[in-house]
Image (tube, coloured by chain):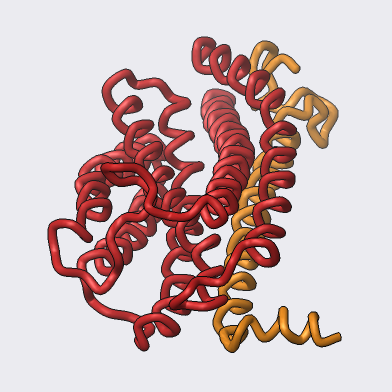
Amino acid sequence: MDAITGFLHMGGYGAYVWPAFAAAALILAWMAVSTLRRLRGNERTLARLQDPRAPDGRPAEGARKGVGVEP
Amino acid sequence: MITFLANPARFLRVAGAVLPWCWAVAAVAGGLGLAIALFASPPDYQQGDSVRIMYIHVPSAWMALGAYTLMAAASAAALVWKHPLAHLVARAAAPLGAGFTAICLVTGALWGQTSWGTWWVWDARLTSVLILFFLYLGVIALGQAFDDAERGDRAAALLAIVGFVNIPVIKFSVDWWATLHQPASVLRAGGPAIDSSMLAPLLLMALAFLAYFLALLVLGVRAELAGRKARALMALGAAGEDRAL
């Protein structure tokens, strides 16, 4: 228990060290979340546009053969 | 149009192969680095345990400068050789670099309060890094300021290139001016002046941050690529509707 309190206390600097690590973790997480959100959103939009089934059954204007990336 | 799609397809294949390695390196180096930084490495004889902030602050500073350099280089390549992927790399790098700069500024302020007795000082190092942060924000904002994405690309690229002059200023600020911020301890003539018990976790955290940056960069370029294709399809669709009328 003493070891854990000592660890959290960080020789008296705990109030500075832990917020520093926490801020870094939060910002790093934000970087990942924002990148992934942009990726998912854009890929969803692209998939919708490339869907050859338009609501009225005819091919949508934007869907053409050859436009798109081979997997 | 076809050349545009062919190169990115190849890029995406290579990037997709590299991505899991980036995550693995980030996790392993980061886990090991944090463990050593928080447990095994010694407290500083003057700063005590507050020195452990260094293991976040210094690697994030290196990433802030490195990401900007990549962004400026990609912007220059885009403007000179007109390679469309280069603009997307610059766009993807910008928010990541801004994030690392923010980490550097915040952890630096906390460390400064313990070692200098102040959260902030307008010395050359801190001021030029704050300017770096504003430059990142400016590049991001300019890239989004135009309806025509390519105009946004070019405007953002110009600012990124012009702003590159700030990078050597940041690096040499501690030599050229009298600064509260200490001079270089690692990347200096004569080699690192830091004990290996501290250098090891420092380099591990730097490697972890680099791998993390590269992973998110790949995902970011993928995101930008999908966004561009979507815009191109929407433009084609709009053109088709005009013809139908």
Report the residue at 56% width, 17% height from top: B5
Residue A56 or B34: which is nearer the viewer? B34
Q: Closer to the camera, B145 or B202?
A: B202
Side (left or right) of B228 relative to B134? right
Q: Nearer the viewer, residue B71 or B166?
A: B166
x then y, percent, for residue B20: 74, 33
> B187 left or right of B57?
left
Note the chain letter of the red one.
B
Chain A color in figure: orange
The one nearer the camera, B48 or B209, is B48
Residue B83 sits above or below residue B111 on the image = above
Name the residue: 27% across, 48% down. Answer: B167
The answer, for residue B241, to whether it is visible in the render is no
- In the rendered image, residue B138, in percent from the top left (x then y), is placed at 33, 56
Q: Residue at coordinates 79% horizontally, 81% vertically from top-left?
A: A3
Q: How far across and how far down the image is residue B242, in percent?
A: 52, 29
Residue B205: x and y in percent read 59, 51
Q: Is residue B7 visible from the viewing direction of this image?
A: yes
Could you say which quadrant of the image residue B213 lies in?
top right
**Looking at the figure, which quarter contains the C terminus of chain B?**
top right
